[in-house]
Amino acid sequence: MRIGNWIFNYMIVQITPPALNNIGYKTYIIFAVLNACWVPIIYLFFPETKGLELEDVDRLFAKGGSLERLNEGSAEEVGRLAESPVEKV
């Protein structure tokens, strides 16, 4: 997965200077539109992990994990996860 990040970063570094020379400020509009496209994808497909303990996040992202698997615990544990405030460190 890390190699994909390096490849796309390298691609952006190589594309940006010619794009700025050829289409100018429109390059920033293209990047803004592409970034805006990620907002609904992240909102819809990435689970919220706020307030979950590390073990619960691990279970959530385990292979085949889902939010329903978190609810397999006891009712009081599920309530504790849902209502506990986030600790300030």
Image: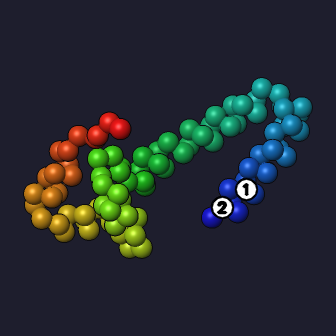
Q: Quadrant of residue 34?
A: top right
Looking at the picture, how far across and down is residue 67, in whole percent? 29, 61
Q: How is the image coloured?
A: rainbow
Instruction: Tell me where residue 59 appears, x and y as whole percent.
Output: 34, 67
Residue found 79% across the figure and 51% down from its top = 10
Q: Which mark is residue 39?
A: none
Q: Quadrant of the C terminus?
A: top left
Dot 1, how many residues are within 10 Å of its Cα: few (below 14), some (14-19), or many (20+)?
few
Q: Is residue 82 left or right of residue 86?
A: left
Whether residues under marks 1 and 2 lie with C-beta atoms below 8 angstroms apart, the answer is yes
Local packing at callout 2 (Cα closer than 10 Å; few below 14, some 14-19, many 20+) is few
Considering every residue shown, the one lying at the far left of the view is 76
The secondary element bearing badge 2 is classed as: helix
Residue behind mark 1: 6
Residue at 15% x, 58% y is: 77
Res 31 seen here: yes
User: In this picture, is 28 found above or below 58?
Assistant: above
Amino acid on which disc 1 is placed: Trp
User: Farthest bottom residue?
Assistant: 64
The residue nearer to you, when weighing 7 against 35, is 7
User: Considering only vertical position in the picture, is 70 above or below 85?
Assistant: below
Q: Is residue 61 left or right of residue 11?
A: left
Name the kind of residue labelled 2 in the image.
Arg
Q: Who's the residue at 32% across and 62% down the image? A: 55
What residue did someone put label 2 on?
2
